[in-house]
Image (cartoon, rainbow, N blue to C red):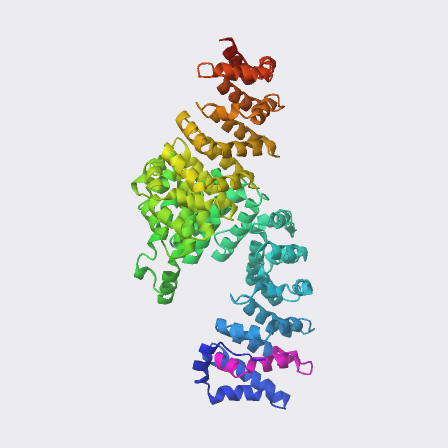
Amino acid sequence: MACVLEAPLRMSVLSEVTASSRHYVDRLFDLDPQKVLQGVIDMKNAVIGNNKQKANLIVLGAVPRLLYLLQQESSSTELRTECAVVLGSLAMGTENNVKSLLDCHIIPALLQGLLSPDLKFIEACLRCLRTIFISPVTPEDLLYTDSSVISHLMGLLSRSRYTQEYICQIFSHCCKGPDHQTILFNYGAVQNIAHLLVSTSNKVRMQALKCFSVLAFENPQVSMTLVNVSVDGELLPQIFVKMLQRDKPIEMQLTSAKCLTSMCRAGAIRTDDPCIVLKTLPCLVRMCSKDRLLEERVEGAETLAYLIETDVELQRMASITDHLIVMLADYFKYPSSVSAIADIKRLDHDLKHAHELRQAAFKLYASLGANDEDIRKKIIETENMMDRIVNGLSESSIKVRLAAVRCLHSLSRSVQQLRTSFQDHAVWKPLMKVLQNAPNEILVVASSTLCNLLLEFSPSKEPILESGAIELLCSLTQSENLALRVNGIWALMNMAFQAEQKIKSDILRGLSTEQLFQLLSDSDVNVLMKTLGLLRNLLSTRPHIDHIMSTHGKQIMQAVTLILEGEHNIEVKEQTLCILANIADGTTAKELIMTNDDILQKIKYYMSHSNAKLQLAAMFCISNLIWNEEEGSQERQDKLRDMGIVDILHKLSQSSDPNLCDKAKTALQQYLA
């Protein structure tokens, strides 16, 4: 098996291969086991901290030979252990090194090594596995290919503090998503790792804590279990709170806060519990302070954003803790001066990662402003806030763009801000630009924001219309992504509300009859309800009703029939009857109902329905048809009387429901006038 670096790198490395590097590899093939052992030990000393030497040895084929020696039962335990140590050292080099090790099937060889009775060898194998699994190039699923591996690792947790540290680190790095969480949970991760939280080793406690942090994230099953687990008579939440204290390492404080946050979001801990309000939230706000390291500020802000995302009381509390709203403004000025960071490497790192701070700030501002109008006002009044959001919408980083759109969406829920700040900064322009070409996750939030900007009181509505929004939104309604379909039709519904006839006609033209039917037969009730809402808004004001029904009447009546005959919930049927009531309010449009006996029978049926909402909606149709001040009312009244409508009205006038009773009496008066 060829086990070498990728081609571009191989040539440059080969040209620098030295005689001494060859000498290290040659010694691995010596017939004297003692010389082989000494050769491996010398190789270990040669590669420590020397990436060039590591690359040379990999190119020269050291890895397959080391793996062979590691797996040979005839090799001494000391030799096998030293081989595992050298392989671990090679893995600590570049990502290409790790790829080369993976190509040589190092993971199965190391996992096999864990079956050895020798603890030192097991620890060396685990240390090497840990180094490989924490590399971004290693697929996490390699840990889960054989279920017996997880079971064996759980069993090894009790062997030593090193096995505990390395196994917890492997689990926390390889637990990505609900499937992995379930596997680890089912193999007893909670019970096996819980007691490690009170280990005498700080490293073990930290890795155990990280394990719980990833196990509990967005996982109600794990969170609900954790809340009831106790170690030495103390419940886990209490242990986590102790780890939040200011005298603990920052990483420990942050990770404990993440555990408690996940448990709170899963409903295992109440949002008003003192451990959240008095401990977790203040700890996370502390992490946002400018005297913390960049990654601590990022993690602190993102975890806090997640904690308060759905709870208005926590949002209010966070907004008044340590001047958080103002503190977050510093995230956009980072690094403010070179002199503040003495370490040049740290400065270089932070300059490359400064966009993560902006992303975290936008996320936290979005959560803070999700519900409370006063908080939104404070956020927008923070220096240059709207400019920062506008700039964020065009950043090269997708994550920053997404966070900026989320922040904008959160603030767009404010009627006051839509009328003022949003208009002053013409945020609709960059938003429309974002909508032209973006991944779905950004499109979903951006189109939700557009829905708010298209509400009738928003000054942005007109310029958005002029910039070609109808075509864009109509295309969204054809998306395979459900959220985009909902948002596309929702935005069109808002656009059609109290709109001019030309806009309504443009919407109908843009959608096409075929697409309208497609939306009305969508399997998702949200899409259906928003489409009916759009139709209802299109069919408002008499001249518009008559105009639209003269051009699209046949198709609209077909759609109405389709829905009233289908298996739909009460809300859908009610909305459909309201559309009929609007059509009945037209001057010429009402004839489309009067000449359609099938529809008239359906209205009659719903007048006697067991649901009062549907009865009332059907009554609105009848009232609009028989209103005697309008031309042809006598003929319409006679036809409806012959159908038995008046008898039903008499019955309904005796109804115990005051709305139905009043509406029936008003309708009967039209017959008496």
Front residue (pair 585, 55): 585
Task: Quadrant for the N terminus, please.
Answer: bottom right
Q: Is 7 situated left or right of 224 in this image?
A: left
Q: Residue 631: give x, y in percent of width and height.
A: 44, 17
Residue 132 falls in image quadrant: bottom right
What span is colored magenta in the figure?
Answer: 55-82
Residue 321 is at least partly visible in this image: no
Q: Residue at x 57, y 88 (%)?
A: 27
**Numbered disc total:** 0
Q: Residue at x 58, y 48 (%)?
A: 238
Front residue (pair 612, 121): 612
Front residue (pair 451, 160): 451
Front residue (pair 651, 119): 651
Residue 9 is at least partly visible in this image: yes
Q: Residue 306: give x, y in percent of width and height.
A: 49, 47
Q: Residue 431: give x, y in percent of width and height.
A: 37, 46
Q: Is 186 situated left or right of 474 in this image?
A: right
For the stretch drawn in magenta, what is the main secondary structure? Answer: helix
